[in-house]
Image (cartoon, coloured by chain):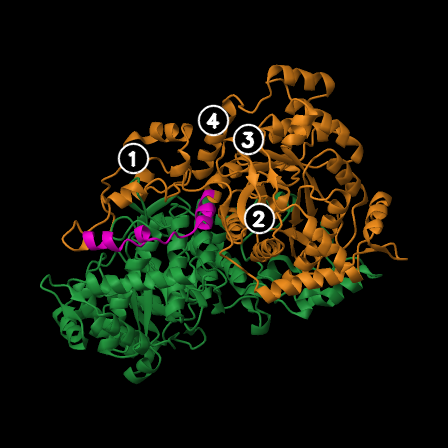
Chain colours: A orange, B green
């Protein structure tokens, strides 16, 4: 059953693999890439999608949202919202529909180098990190310790080297910086100095946004260059579910919009606590909240780039604790993606979360379940896709590296099945069966598609038990650690040029040592 | 973000969990069950499905299959097949279409106890084991050793206790029995004495089928009872891809059909070696081969229960070795499921295969990827779904146990999103937000759906890092081993009554010691 290879790449062994990694495949030979088109999976029927939409409109019209800041109340009531005696802003359907019409549907999230831009049109799928973990997972000692700025920078440097991690939203909090302003600014520095891919981050206080913009202008080489290609977005928890604006975060959002920064409208309800426990109900509420955010953005600045961030999370009702590794979570996220498709809006949600504390078998199945379903459902931005453990409390560098392999396979699924005369292969079958060799190993079609059709894992092991035993039963996690050490030993290619770096350091208290 | 539980089940701790396991949930409260309806995921468009169908018909008409046994040639040519001078049987489209019309679409695979019957209609999904692994994985020593009859029996006993393992096709070979006849017969004994769920197995030689039927009649309590509810099926590799009948296996199949045994028509091409390397091409060939098998069965006995077993496997073209953990494999299987749907035939394919040698993170992502996609695509019989490692060469009891958790989450995804006034939750949202508690933790709807909506893992860990550390950082695999020991210490509930057992043992050389 295991034919001998007539087309082996194996002879080169480790050296060949390293060389292969160093010289990425030319684009036409890459089996997967950012922005593949999903949507083959639809958990909801069209009438169900419409019911969710209409229920969300009902909720906005009848329940509305509390706690908008005075600036928001002024803008939104001027646009047609109604401020009730209960302090809640209610949204007439016509206003929501008008703003849906005005919303930006051609959003590209920029990278700093131009090579990793994210086109969020249609059902193009991108995977990346996100979150606010407070722990680092040490796989050697099985320890959870507080995460640091250096950990964050290292995560950025690792993500920069992984083909299937398409963006870096700040996945963890620099717990070693006590001052919130310094933390927010150093977070930007640590991320952008580590990767040229698109970065996402949050701000603790609206007052910090001006400083952040000043740093971003320095990095970009001027405000005009920043505004032309904003390579950093604001991940903004603009609501406190259920159905309340997060007053301070709304003010942050206003500052970011003025500064030309794309906004992720992030509604993070927990199904069973801050959102209905049912999947449909949690989606309704998330959609209602994000529609409120969309109105807010487009009333303030029509067409400002915004990501529709319905991020409902699961809850383990036995304990009341968050859980992100369940089938329910995968359905929450996939259902949201279908709503984004319905609105034809750039959208994002959370997937790839492991409840497991370590990168073990449980983590593998948890991360794949929601990641592959998110991709197949055509989610534009799959946040939290790699490295997240303990239901978002812990981040793990080794897991991030293994996540690149995992997401590679998920992306292969998103790419799907090509059907053409060539792939249907009737002529090839005829040649092989009728007087041919009787097998397909050496056919022109097999050889010609060897790279372009197949995603080969970097660390995932496919050797036979015999080979594996001869190689000393290599451990997956140990191999990931070795790869981490290798990446971090290299010079960070995303680092700022010395003049820019000096300018940033003279203006801000940067906690990372100069590189 | 982590609300305190107002509805805790935790106080009971381990004792409560054991009690909960011991007393299964009443059916209306079970969040998942065998036979949930999939099909929300469709990797192929309808025109693509039809192109695959027509290309398969072309292949049958133009290329045909070699190596049918004389009995098959006689039956098939009598029915309208054409025997060419090249010895190949070619199948006119009209004959294939006639036999498709006659095929049994209401197949139920019986369990011995009647409680675990598998209704293969529509897109009902069932997960179970399968394969012919020759190694057992010892997770303690990380060793691969030869698999034994006792290992097989233990796998059956474990599968019997796992809710989400719906059937037991023989997953490994009893390497400790040298005589093939004794191996085949002891395989039946070891499986059936371990579980009352539906069993699948193979026969090395057509001459062994009569003995097997005699044993099955003894187990059933008579031939009439066996024929009324055949609780064991023949997994039959009736083809040697590409496009050749497996002569001996066809003769086995004929014996099984005469004996009233359901047949799994298993075509196991390897994409890139014994099948085209393209996903579409491998599906075309598998469909063509299984259609040939379907004609064979229905010419011989119209309506005989048969499972359309398109099992194309992936190949790592770098080495020529089989691989089952890839995205390509998940697509092969999901595409096949869509073809089964098109024919409205009971169908099966392989998923859940890990290339990894151990139940580690790689195994988790590999097993989930194809398992959840198989379920979402509505595959009736998901074979190889749990326990399989090293690209089918190794079986692991701990992995089987963890597979129950993994498949539980996959089944939750198959169940999907319910949309109704109740689940859309507008009224609940109104009550909670407008003067209510502001959260959903204690609502009647949340409490009422706590069991029925949520799949809670048995071994998967959802504790916080703090709790986890306090509990001594429990290891997933060690917990699975403990569960294995627990199951195997219990009395096997599927064991035969003493009189039946004595009758079997007096007639056949049973290698397992009396229980």
Q: Is residue B481 left or right of residue B138?
A: right
- The residue where tag 1 is placed is A9
Vertical order, A122 against A248 (above or below): below
Chain name for mark 4: A
Across and down, in percent, residue B137 comes to 37, 49
Mark 2 and mark 3 lie on one chain; the one further toward the N terminus is 3
- Do residues under tags 1 and 3 come within 8 Å of each other at their CB atoms? no
| Residues tagged 2 and 1 counted as in contact (Cβ below 8 A) | no
Secondary structure beneath dot 4 equals helix
| Mark-to-mark CA distance, 2 and 4 | 28 Å
Residue located 72% across and 51% down the image = A99
What separation in Å lies between label 3 and label 4 (alpha carbons)? Answer: 26 Å
Is label 1 in a helix, a strand or a loop?
A: loop
The magenta-colored residue range is A408-432
**Is the C terminus of chain B in the top left, top right, bottom left or bottom right quadrant?**
bottom left
Marks 3 and 4 belong to one chain: yes
> Looking at the image, is mark 2 or mark 1 earlier in the sequence?
1
For marks 2 and 4, the one nearer the N-term is 2
Towards the viewer: B376 or A513:
B376
Q: Which mark is residue A114?
A: 3
The residues bearing labels 1 and 3 have C-alpha atoms spaced at a distance of 33 Å
Disc 1 chain ID: A
Give the alpha-carbon distance from disc 2 to disc 1, as whole Å: 34 Å
Q: Give me the residue at 20% from left, 58% from top.
A: B178
- CA gap between label 1 and label 4 equals 23 Å
Inter-mark Cα distance, 2 to 3: 26 Å
Question: Mark 3, residues whose alpha carbon is within 10 Å: few (<14), some, or many (≥20)?
Answer: few
> Can you say whether A63 is above or below B234 in the image?
above
Horizontal side, residue A294 vs residue A361: left or right: right
Residue pointed to by mark 2: A351
């Amino acid at each position: 059953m295991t034919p001998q290879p007539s087309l082996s790449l194996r002879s080169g062994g480790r050296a060949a693999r390293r060389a292969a990694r160093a010289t990425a495949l030319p684009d036409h030979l890459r089996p997967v890439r950012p922005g593949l088109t999903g949507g083959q999976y639809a958990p909801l029927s069209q009438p169900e999608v419409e019911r969710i939409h209409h229920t969300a409109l009902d909720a906005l019209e009848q329940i509305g949202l509390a706690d908008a800041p005075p600036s928001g109340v002024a803008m939104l009531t001027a646009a047609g919202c109604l401020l009730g005696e209960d302090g809640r802003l209610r949204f007439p359907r016509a206003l929501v529909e008008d703003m849906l019409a005005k919303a930006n549907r051609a959003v590209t999230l920029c990278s700093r180098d131009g090579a990793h831009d994210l086109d969020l049109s249609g059902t193009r799928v991108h995977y990346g990190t996100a979150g606010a973990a407070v722990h680092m997972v040490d796989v050697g000692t099985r320890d959870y310790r507080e995460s640091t700025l250096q950990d964050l920078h290292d995560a950025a440097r690792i993500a920069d080297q992984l083909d299937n991690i398409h963006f870096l939203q700040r996945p963890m909090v620099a717990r070693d910086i006590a001052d919130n302003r310094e933390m927010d600014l150093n977070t930007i520095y640590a991320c952008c100095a580590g990767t040229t891919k698109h970065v996402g981050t949050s701000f603790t206080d609206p007052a910090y946004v001006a400083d952040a913009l000043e740093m971003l202008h320095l990095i970009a080489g001027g405000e005009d260059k920043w505004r032309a290609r904003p390579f950093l977005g604001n991940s903004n928890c603009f609501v406190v579910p259920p159905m309340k604006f997060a007053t301070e975060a709304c003010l942050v959002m206003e500052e970011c919009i003025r500064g030309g920064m794309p906004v992720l409208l992030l509604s993070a309800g927990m199904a069973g606590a801050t959102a209905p426990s049912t999947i449909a109900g949690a989606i309704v509420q998330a959609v209602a909240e994000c529609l409120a955010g969309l109105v807010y953005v487009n009333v303030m600045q029509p067409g400002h780039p915004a990501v529709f961030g319905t991020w409902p999370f699961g809850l383990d009702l036995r304990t009341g604790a968050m859980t992100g590794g369940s089938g329910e979570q995968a359905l929450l996220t996939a259902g949201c993606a279908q709503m984004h498709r319905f609105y034809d809006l750039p959208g994002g949600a959370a997937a790839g979360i492991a409840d497991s504390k370590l990168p073990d078998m449980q983590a593998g199945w948890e991360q794949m379940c929601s990641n592959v379903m998110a991709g197949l459902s055509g989610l534009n931005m799959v946040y939290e896709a790699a490295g997240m453990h303990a239901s978002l409390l812990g981040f793990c560098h080794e897991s991030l590296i293994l996540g690149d392999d995992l997401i590679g396979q998920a992306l292969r699924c998103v790419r799907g099945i090509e059907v053409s005369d060539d792939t249907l292969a009737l002529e090839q079958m005829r040649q092989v069966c009728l007087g041919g060799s009787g097998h397909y190993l050496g056919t022109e079609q097999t050889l010609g598609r060897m790279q372009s059709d197949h995603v080969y894992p970097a660390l995932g092991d496919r050797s036979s038990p015999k080979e594996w035993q001869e190689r000393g039963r290599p451990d997956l996690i140990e191999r990931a650690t070795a790869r981490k050490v290798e990446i971090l030993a290299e010079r960070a290619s995303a680092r700022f040029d010395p003049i820019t770096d000096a300018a940033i350091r003279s203006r801000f208290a940067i906690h990372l040592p100069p590189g």
